[in-house]
Amino acid sequence: MVLLTGKHIKKSFSEKTLLEDVEIAINEGEKIGLVGINGSGKSTLLKIIAGVMEEDGGEIIRNNDLRIGYLPQNPVCDPSRTVLEQALLWSEDTVEEYMVKKLLTIMHMDRFDQPMGELSGGQRKRVALAAVLSGDTNLLILDEPTNHMDNDIIEWMEERLTEYKGAILMITHDRYFLERITDHIMEIEKGRLVSYVGNYESYLMQKEERLELAKAGERKRANLYRKELRWIHWTAPARTTKSRSRVERFEKLRDAKETFEDPRMDINTVTSRLGKKIIELSHISKSFDGRTYIRDFSYNILRNDRIGIVGDNGCGKTTLLKLIMGEEEPDSGTIEIGSTVKIGYFAQEAEDMDPDVRVIRYIEDIARQIRTEDGYASASQMLERFLFPSYMHSVKIGKLSGGEKRRLYLLSILMRAPNVLILDEPTNDLDIDTLTVLEDYLDSWPGAVVIVSHDRYFLDRLVVRTFAFEEGGYIGHYTGGYSKYMNEKEAREQERAEGDPGEASSPGSADPEKNAGRHRRRKLKFSYNEKREYETIDDEIASLEEAIGDVEKDMEENGTNSARLTKLTARKAELEEQLDRKMERWEYLNELAERIERGEEV
C-alpha cells in the first residue's frame, strides 16, 4: 500500500532553490534513509511531508489511513510545562500515560515533573522521541534521531525500529544506524531526489557505479565512496552469501575500471613540530557538587594518538577535554602541556559568526593558505575540499544552513594548523559526505586527535584507543575503537555474571571443596621487569617518534644527496621497526595493567 506520494515538489527560500521537481513515494513498511550534503534541503523535505511546512509547488497525496509521527531536529517546547505534560502534548490523544512514562524512562528522562525550561536541547529531543515512539503510527518521520543520544539508547532504537512494522523516513549521519535499519536510501542532489534500493552499503556501491559512469569531472568523487564502501564492507556484521557474492562481483568490476583521483583528497597538511612532551595527565581527579566525575586518571598523549572518549551524557567527557586543554584545573593530580603543543578545539557549540561576512573572507581572515606536504593549499582549495564549491565562496554566512555553518567552523579550526585536535561531538549536524571528507583528512593528519563522540562508526573508523567512563568516575583504557571496547565490556560482564552464584553465597554456606580452586588463585601482577618496562615505555616510544621526525627532516634537507639519503632511509626503516615492536609491547603492558587494576586473578 502506498502511504504517501509527492509529485513535482518545489521549495525555495529567497533566491536559493532547495527542492526542484522532487518525486517521492513511500510504501507501507519501507525504511528509507534520506541523505545529502548540509543545506541540500533534507529537513525541509521532511517538514513538507510531515505537513508542518507548505511546498511552493507540486502536491502531496496522503493515504486516508496515514498516521504520522514526526520528530523534528530541534523540537520547540513550552518551558513552563513538565516533562510528562510536554510528552503527552506531543504524543497522540489515544496514547496511555504509562506508555509515555515507560519510554521516557528508557530515554533517561524519568524526572517527570521537571520543567522543560531546565532541559538542554538534547534532553528536549529525548522527550520528543519518547512521545513520537509511543504513538500508534504507520509512518515515522525522524530528523537526526541519534543526535545527543547515549549509545545504549541508540542501540535500543535500532532494535525497536528494526521491528517496527510501519514505514520510516529519516535523516541521520549515523552510518551504522542507516546500515542496520534502512532498505532504501534517497539522496537529494541539486534539488532532485535520486533513489537507491538497499541499505547504506548498497547505496555506496550504486553511488560509485553512477559516479563512474558520469562525466570525467564528476567521476573524481567516486574515490570517497570507494573508501567508504571498503570500510563498511569489512567492519559491518556478517552478510548473507548472496550479498557477499554481490560485493565480490562489484569489486571485480570496480578493479577493472580506470581509477580517477579526487584532487581534494591529495591535500595532506603539515602541522607545526611536536616535541617529546605533548600532554601528560598524572593521577587527576575532578568533582562538582559532591560528585566525582574523574577519579585518579593518568595518561600521556602521544604523537599520532587517535583517542576516543565514550560515556553517558553528563558523565564528565567535556570536563575531561577541558582538563586536557588546560582550561580547567584538576582537584588533585597534575597536567603538563608541552611547549610546542598547539591545540585546535572543535566545540559542541560553534563560535558566533558574523552573518554578513562572506565564506571566503571568514576563512582568509584566519589564514590565506595552509602548508601541505607538497607546498601550500589556498583557502579556496580547502573550502572546495570541504564541500564548498567555488560559487559558494562569495555567499554570506547568514545564508548558510546550520550544518553548513558547522562545516565552515570545522574548517576554520583546521586552518589554524594545530598539532593536537580536540573534537567534542564533531559528527552532530554534519552530513555523511562531510564526515567522510573529515575522516579521510584525519587519516593523513600528522598530529594527535582526541574525540568525544556517540557516533560508533566514526569512532571505529578513526580511533586506536578508547577511554570509557565507568562507575565512580573511573575511566577505563581499551585498545581499539568502539566496537572492540563493547566486545571487551560484554565479555567482562559475562565473566562476572558466570561468577555471581559462588560470590553471592554467604561465607558459612560455601562448599570448601567447590571453592578450593578459587582459593588457590592469586592476584595478577607485573613481574619486576614488566613493571620497570611499563614505567618507561611511554618515554621510549616518544623518543623513537622524535628520532624518526629528525630523520625525516634530514631527508628533506638532503634530497639531492643520494648517498646520504640512502643511509637516512635505512635508518628510518630501522627506527620504524623498533617503534612497531615497542607499540606492540605497549599494547600488551597497558592491557595487562588494566587487568591488574580490575583485580583479575590467575
Image: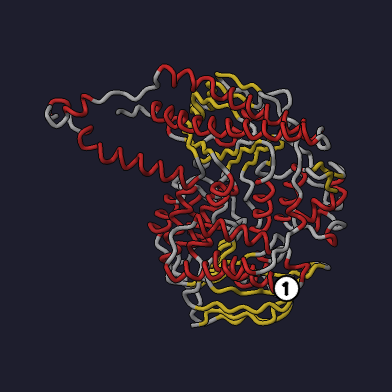
Q: Is residue 122 above or below residue 89?
A: above
Residue 17: where, in percent of width, then height? 78, 70
Depth check: give the residue in front, 572 or 430: 572
Foreground residue among 144 and 570: 570
27 relative to 458, above or below: below
Q: Residues within 10 Å of mark 1 (few under 14, many from 20)?
A: few
Residue lying farthest front? 563
Q: Quadrant of residue 503?
A: top left
Residue 572 in sight from this viewpoint: yes
Give the percent coordinates (x, y) of residue 522. 28, 23
Which secondary structure lies at badge 1? loop
Which quadrant holds residue 300? top right
Considering only vertical position in the picture, is 51 above or below 572? Answer: below
Q: Amino acid at mark 1?
A: Ala
- In-front residue for pair 586/476: 586
Q: Which residue is mark 1?
A: 214
Say which quadrant the C terminus sits in: top left
Percent x, y of residue 390? 84, 60
Q: How is the image coloured?
A: secondary structure
On screen, residue 122 versus residue 242, left or right, reads: right
Name the residue rendered at 79%, 46% in the picture: 353
Q: Is residue 474 visible?
A: no
Residue 465 against residue 295 in the figure, above or below: below
Q: Residue at 52%, 42% (x, y): give it.
A: 313
Residue 120 screen position, x and y as percent? 59, 45
Q: How many marks?
A: 1
Choose between 244 and 90: the one closer to the eye: 244
